[in-house]
Image (cartoon, coloured by chain):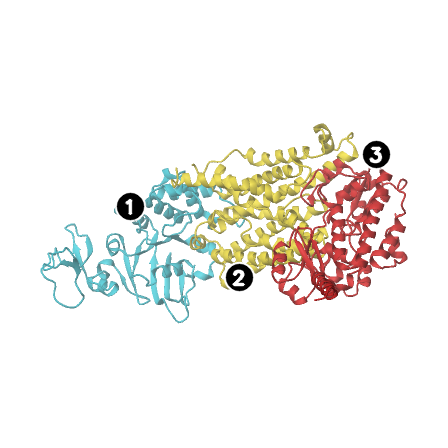
Amino acid sequence: MNLSAHEVAFSYVPGVEILTSVTLTLSTDAVTFILGANGTGKTTLLECLFGLRRPTRGRVDVAGRDLHQLAPKERARKIGLVPQWHEPVFEFSVRQAVLMGRTPHLGPFSSPGRADQRAVDEAMDAVGIASLGRRPYTRISGGERQLALIARGLAQGARCLLMDEPAAHLDPHHQHEILEAVRLLADDGFGFAITSHLPNHALLYGDRVAFLTDGRADLQGDPREVVTEASLERVYGMRFEIVESPTGARAVLPRVHRRRSSDDGALNPIPPQSEPPPSVATRGS
Amino acid sequence: MSRITFAVLAVVLFAWASAAQSGTTLVDQAGYEVSLPDAIESIASVYGIGTYLVYSLGAGDRLTTAYYIGLKSAAQATATMQRWEPRLSDLLSFGDPNVEELVAGGADVVLADASQHEAVAEQLRELGIPVVLLSAESPDAMKEAIQLLATALGEEAQRRADAYVDAYDRVTAAVTSDVSSLVDGTRVRVLFLGTSASTAISGDMYQTNLIEAAGGVSVTEELSGGWSEVNLEQILRWDPDVILIPPYGPVQPSDLLENADWQSLQAVQAGRVVRMPRLIAPMDTPVPESMLGVLWMATLFYPDIVTLDLIDEVVAFYATYYGLTLSDEEIAAFAL
Amino acid sequence: MNPEKRPPVWLIVLLPAGVFLAALFLGRYGIRIGDTVRVLLGLDGPSDVFRSLILRVRLPRVLAAACVGANLAVVGAGFQGLFRNPLVDSRILGVSSGAAFGAALALLLTHEGIAVQMSAFAFAMAAIGLVMLIGFRFGSSTLVLVIGGILVGALFNSLLGLIKYVADPLSTLPTITYWLLGGLNATQWADLPALLATSVVGLSFFFVLRWRLNVLTVSDAEATALGLRVRFLRGAFVVVGALMVAASVSMAGTIGWIGLVVPHVARALTGPDYRIVVPASAALGAGTVIVLDTVARTALPTEIPLGILTGLIGVPAFFLLLVRFLRARGEIR
C-alpha cells in the first residue's frame, strides 16, 4: 500500500504558499525521513498526508485512491499519526491510550469490545510495552510514551505511520529505542514517514530521505546518495562534513574549528565561501 | 428720637426679622432639620409611598414628578387611577433618582426615602434644595410622616392630616375592640402570598402588622427577611384558614382553587382564597389605604363581629382623601 | 492511582436509587415511613392529604432534582473533556446566562410559570445559537467556542442587569432574585415531561458516544487522525449539552458547581475513562442534587435557595479536590 503526494501545494494565507509542489511516495516496508529547515512545511506536509489539511493544489493518494474521497474512518484505518508529546488533560492508562487507536473500527454508537482489546494486546506486544498496560500514560518515560503512540497507530490497523519529530525530548538511549522499533516494524511491512531535524537519524535508520526546500521535495532518494555535504549546506545554510566510522556507518557533523588566535574557546563555524579551512583534523573525508 | 418713633422702629424691625425667618422648619424622619419655603408650589417625590401621602393631603396637583409604589409605567396602573390622575404618564418616574434632573425640575421640595436616598439627599442639600427624608414603614411611622408633610403643605393639608390620623385611629380602635373578644385559639390563621404561589410574607413585613391589627394570625410570622420562598409541603403543614393574595402580581384565586395539588388545604376547600382589591394604591403597603386594608381583612375574617361598615368607610375614604366618587363597579370590588 | 480501577457497578446504580427513595420519606410535613410506603405501593390506608403530598408534591420534585443533577453533571464532565480543561462547568457557554435573562424577562412581563420556563429555555438556546454562530464564522476551535461563550454570557448578564433595574422592587425584583438563586419549590407534574424527555435523550446521547469523548480529549489533529469528524462531533455535543443545561436551568434556576465538582469526584473514584465517568457522573449528580434539594425544603420552614447550597458545598469540595490534585502532581506537600 502506498501513500503518495502528487504535486501537493498548500497555503495557510492566500498568496503565501508553504508547499508549492511536493511529490513524494511512501511505501510500506520503508522508513522515509523528511528533513528540512525550520518553517519549511514539514508538519504541514504531514498534515496533508493524513488528511487533516486539504492541499490547495495537487492530491494525496492512498492505495491508489484520493485520500479525500475516503471517509475519515477509512483513512484512519490506513494511516496513523504519532504526534509529538504534549501533556494530556486526563491521566489515561497506557492501555486506554492505545485502545483509542481502535476508534476507526467502532460502529457509530459502540465502545471497544473484546476484539479491540485483542488488537491492543497485539499492538503493545509488537512494540514491546505489554507490561505497561495499567500504568498512567503520564508516568512512563518519554521513550515508552512514543512506543505507546506507535502501538496506537498499529492498533488502528494502519500500514503507514506518520511521525512528527519523534526524537525530540528524548535522550539518546530512548531515541535509539524508538527508531530501532520503527526499523523492526518496517521490516515487518509497515511504512513510516518521519519528520526530523537530525540528518544522522536518516543515515542510521532511514531507507529514504526527502529534503523539503522552497516548498518542494526535489531532493529525495537513498540517504547515502542524497545526504551529501552539498545538499546539507543547501538545506540548512551552513557547512557540514560527513564522517565515516570504521564500521561503515556515516555521521554528519557541523564544520567548526577553533581559531588559534583567540584562545577563548569560542567555536566559530566556517563561513560558506571564503578562506579554506585551516588544518582541522578529519577522519576520512 | 422720640419714644413713638423708637417704638415704631422697633416694631418694624421685629416684624421684618420674623418675616425673614418665616417659612417652615421641620425635622424629617431621618433626623435632619429641613428649612422649607413658606408656600410650596411644586413637589418632587422619589418616595413611592410619599407620593400617596401627598395625594391624600390634597396636594397632588403640586407634584412635578413622582415615583409611585409598584408602578413603572402608566399602563400598569388600575383603570381608576388612570382616570383619576390624568397627568400620570407625565409625572411617573422610577429607578435611581437623577440629581440633575431633580435640580432642573426646579421643585420647591423633594420627598425621598430615608432608607435608600441618604446620598442623594446630601447632594441635594449641597445644591440648596430642601429634601425631606421619610420612612413610613410602620403604621406609626406612616402617621408621623403624613403629619410631618402636612406642616409644610398648608392649612388644608394639616386639616386632612389630622382628620386622617383620627380616622385611622378610629377605625383601628373599632377593629381592635371588636376582635378583643376573640379567644386565642379561635383567631383566623392567614397565609399572605406574594407574586407567586411559592412566595409569602415574613414576620417583619408591613402586612403582618395589618393581619394582627385585624385580629388574625400570620402563619409566616416566624420567618424573616422580606419575601420568603416556601413550598407546598410547608403550606400544607400550616394549613391556614384563609389565603390572601396581594393586589399586585399575577396570582389569582382560581390559580389555587382550580389546582389539584392545593385541594388538600382547608382554605381551598372552603373557597377562602381572596385577592385584595385595589383602586389606587395597594392596601397592604404603608399608604393611607392601609387603614382600609385592616378593615377589609377584619371584615373578611370576622364578618359577624366587625361593627364598622366596610363599604361606607371605603366610599368615605376615597371621597375625603382622593376627592373621588366611586362607581358601583368600584364599590363592588370591595364587597365581601 | 490506577486509572483503570473502578468501583463495583452497584455503587453507580443503587446510589441514586437509594437517595431517591430516602428523599421521598423526608419533608416538612411529617409522614410515617409506613404510610409513605403504602402510598408508593398504591395500597389503601393513608389519607388523601398524605397521598397528595407524596405523589403530587414530593415525587415530582425529587424526580426533577434527579434530572437536573444528572444533566448538569454529565454535561460538565463532557465539556471538561471537549474543551480539554478540567476547570470547566456546564455554565461555560453562556447557556445559564441566557436562561437567566429569559426567565427574568418573562417574570417582568407576565409572571406566568409556564412562560417563565419556556422563555428561559428559548433564550438559553438562543445563547448557544449565538456561540455556534461565532464558532461557525471563526472556526470552531475550543478557544473560539470558549471565548464566544464568555462574550455571550456577558451579554446576557448585562441585559439581565437592565431587567433588574426596570423591575418593580416591590414584587418583581424579589421574584427574579429568588429565581436566580435557584430552587425547585415550584415544581409540578406538568413540568416533568419536557424535563424527563430532554434528560433521557441527552443522557443517552452522552452515554452512547462516551467513548468518543475519550478520544476528543487528545488534540484535534490526533482525533482527526483517529477517524473522527472533530468539528461535527464537538458541535453535536455542545448543542445537546446546551439543551440539557437549558432544560435544567429553566426548571431549577441558575445553580452552579454541580457540573464542575461532580465529574471530578467521579474521576477520583473511577479514573478518567468516560465509559465509566459518564454514568458515574449522572448517578452522583442526581444523588447530590436530590440530597441538597431535600435539605433545601426540609431544614427550615422557608426554602433555602438551591444555588446557595450548591455553592456552600461546591466550593469546599472543589478546594479539597484541588489540594488532592496538586498533591498528586507533587506541586504541594
Mark 2 and mark 3 in contact? Answer it, CB < 8 Å. no
User: Which mark lies nearer to you, 3 or 1?
Assistant: 3
The residue that mark 3 highlights is B186
The amino acid pointed to by label 2 is Ile
Q: Is residue C106 left or right of residue C333?
A: right
Q: What hue represents chain B?
A: red
**Element marked by disc 1:** helix
Q: In the rendering, which numbered label is found on residue C134?
A: 2
Q: How many marks?
A: 3
| Chain ID, cyan in image | A
Residue at the image point whose x is 68% and y is 32% from the top = C25
Disc 1 chain ID = A
Distance of label 2 from label 3 (alpha carbons): 65 Å
Q: In the rendering, which numbered label is found on residue B290?
A: none
The residue that mark 1 highlights is A174
Compared with C149, C326 (above or below) is above
- Badge 2: few (under 14), some or many (20 or more) residues near its Cα, within 10 Å? some
Residue at the image point whose x is 42% and y is 45% from the top = A97
Q: What hue represents chain C?
A: yellow
The amino acid pointed to by label 1 is His
